């Protein structure tokens, strides 16, 4: 169709060119050389118009799903779900989280090692004051975080960053907000020796402490098969082994993607389409919903906030801590993209824990990262959402502005990424 229109425009232009150069110019008494110059000038104009028609048509074809009203999608009272094979263009297959996390060398997790790691994870004796454990800041009932803006460590000292969840962390390639740890073992050593968190002077001191605590010598010997097994590496490996059981693969989202089309509500399905259409999925890529996922990584680090010229950045002090950004660099901070799995349970939000609600966090991301307007009205239409169960693809929905209804739908979808703590593999650990 686009080629036909372009050819028609060119033909019409040539006819007009011929009429002007041969008939009208002749009547006006123009010389032969004048007619040639006139024809050349008009010919360039015809070519330019034809190219413009082609470019505009090409862009309209490529972006026709940006606004449903432009290509005949009928509005409906509520999102409709169709489970059938479709030939439409989608943003790509959605993925469910595997039931088990990857392990070093693909070795299975031994129950006795997981049990030892669980004991160490809850051991307050690993802090200098004897009252802080890993589980003090990473609580199962709080989605793997601690419900606080920033965590409290030894002697009531407080950190400067919000506690990330440890649920599903085994699926990530980089850990901590600034991505400085490359494995669960690396991450486990950080809080132990942090002067604000558990306060141990060194990992050697941690090793000495574990040797002095009752019962650990036998547990380590049993777990590692040797009598002198209490070493720094084994301590960190045991804690990491326990954390590798902290998986939540049975969310409503995972069930939906695996084939249960009743697992998500119509509002959650609309939120899923918005999540794809607005571009959220570019950085928060499923199934980990993080760019740092070991499964389908997407760059790990992203700048935030990109667009700092808005009240949100000032109101919530989002730009003073710049994460992994170089001290001499300017512009946005640089952060490991956090996972959104279990995000509905881990308020408050962002690296400084300054945002209390999920809905407000969504509005901030829409404005600071996508530079879209968020409006208080509920005026956006309710599009038909098409789900291809065989291909596991969904129609993206891209409104011009994000309405209050859209924010609610996005929040509803993000709620589908959470699992009740009682359903995690952790709750069934030995």
Image: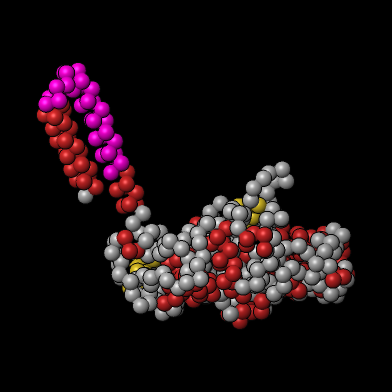
Figure disc tally: 0
Q: Residue furthest front?
A: 28
Residue 405 in sight in this render = yes
Q: Residue at x 67, y 45 (%)?
A: 330
Residue 78 part of the magenta segment: no
Residue 45 part of the magenta segment: yes
Snapshot quadrant of residue 8: top left
Of residues 76 and 258, the one nearer the viewer is 76
> Percent from the top left, x then y, of residue 280?
50, 61
Q: Which residues are magenta?
A: 26-54
> Percent from the top left, x then y, of residue 206?
84, 63
> Percent from the top left, x then y, of residue 51?
29, 39
Horizontal side of 337 relative to 28 (left or right) equals right
Quadrant location, the C terminus: bottom right
Of residues 272 and 237, the one nearer the viewer is 272
Q: Residue at x 67, y 63 (%)?
A: 315
Q: Residue at x 68, y 55 (%)?
A: 319
Snapshot quadrant of residue 243: bottom right
Of residues 119 and 419, the one nearer the viewer is 419
Snapshot quadrant of residue 223: bottom right
Q: Main secondary structure of the magenta part?
A: helix
- State the colouring used for the structure image: secondary structure
> Percent from the top left, x then y, of residue 419?
56, 77
Q: Residue at x 68, y 44 (%)?
A: 329
Of residues 120 and 339, the one nearer the viewer is 339
Q: Residue furthest bottom?
A: 422
Residue 223 in sight in this render = no
């Amino acid at each position: 169709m686009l080629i036909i229109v372009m050819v028609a425009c060119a033909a019409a232009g040539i006819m007009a060119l011929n009429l002007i150069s041969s008939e009208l110019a002749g009547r006006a008494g123009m010389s032969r050389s004048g007619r040639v110059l006139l024809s050349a000038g008009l010919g360039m104009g015809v070519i330019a118009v034809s190219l413009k028609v082609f470019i505009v048509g090409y862009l309209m074809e490529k972006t026709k799903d940006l606004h449903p009203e432009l290509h005949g999608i009928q509005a409906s009272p509520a999102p409709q779900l169709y489970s059938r094979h479709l030939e439409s263009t989608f943003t790509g297959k959605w993925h469910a989280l595997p039931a088990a996390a990857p392990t070093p060398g693909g070795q299975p997790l031994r129950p006795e090692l997981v049990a030892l790691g669980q004991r160490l994870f809850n051991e307050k004796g690993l802090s200098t004051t004897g009252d802080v454990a890993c589980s003090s800041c990473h609580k199962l009932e709080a989605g793997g975080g601690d419900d606080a803006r920033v965590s409290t460590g030894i002697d009531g000292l407080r950190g400067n960053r919000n506690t990330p969840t440890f649920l599903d962390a085994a699926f990530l390639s980089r850990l901590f907000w600034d991505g400085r740890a490359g494995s669960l073992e690396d991450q486990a050593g950080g809080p132990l020796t942090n002067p604000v968190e558990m306060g141990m002077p060194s990992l050697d001191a941690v090793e000495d402490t574990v040797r002095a605590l009752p019962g650990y010598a036998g547990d380590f010997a049993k777990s590692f098969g040797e009598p002198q097994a209490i070493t720094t590496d084994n301590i960190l490996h045991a804690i990491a082994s326990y954390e590798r059981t902290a998986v939540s693969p049975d969310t409503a989202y995972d069930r939906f993607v695996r084939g249960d089309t009743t697992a998500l509500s119509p509002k959650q399905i609309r939120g899923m389409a918005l999540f794809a259409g607005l571009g959220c999925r570019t950085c928060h890529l499923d199934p980990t919903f993080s760019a740092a996922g070991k499964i389908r990584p997407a760059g790990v680090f992203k700048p935030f906030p990109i667009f700092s010229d808005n009240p949100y950045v000032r109101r919530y002090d989002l730009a003073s801590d710049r994460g992994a950004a170089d001290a001499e660099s300017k512009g946005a901070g640089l952060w490991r993209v956090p996972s959104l799995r279990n995000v509905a349970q881990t308020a408050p939000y962002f690296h400084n824990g300054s945002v209390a609600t999920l809905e407000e966090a969504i509005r901030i991301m829409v404005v600071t990262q996508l530079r879209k307007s968020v409006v208080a009205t509920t005026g956006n239409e309710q599009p038909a959402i098409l789900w291809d169960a065989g291909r596991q693809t969904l129609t993206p929905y891209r409104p011009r502005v994000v309405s209050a209804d859209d924010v609610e739908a996005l929040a509803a979808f993000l709620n589908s990424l959470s699992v009740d703590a009682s359903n995690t593999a952790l709750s069934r650990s030995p």
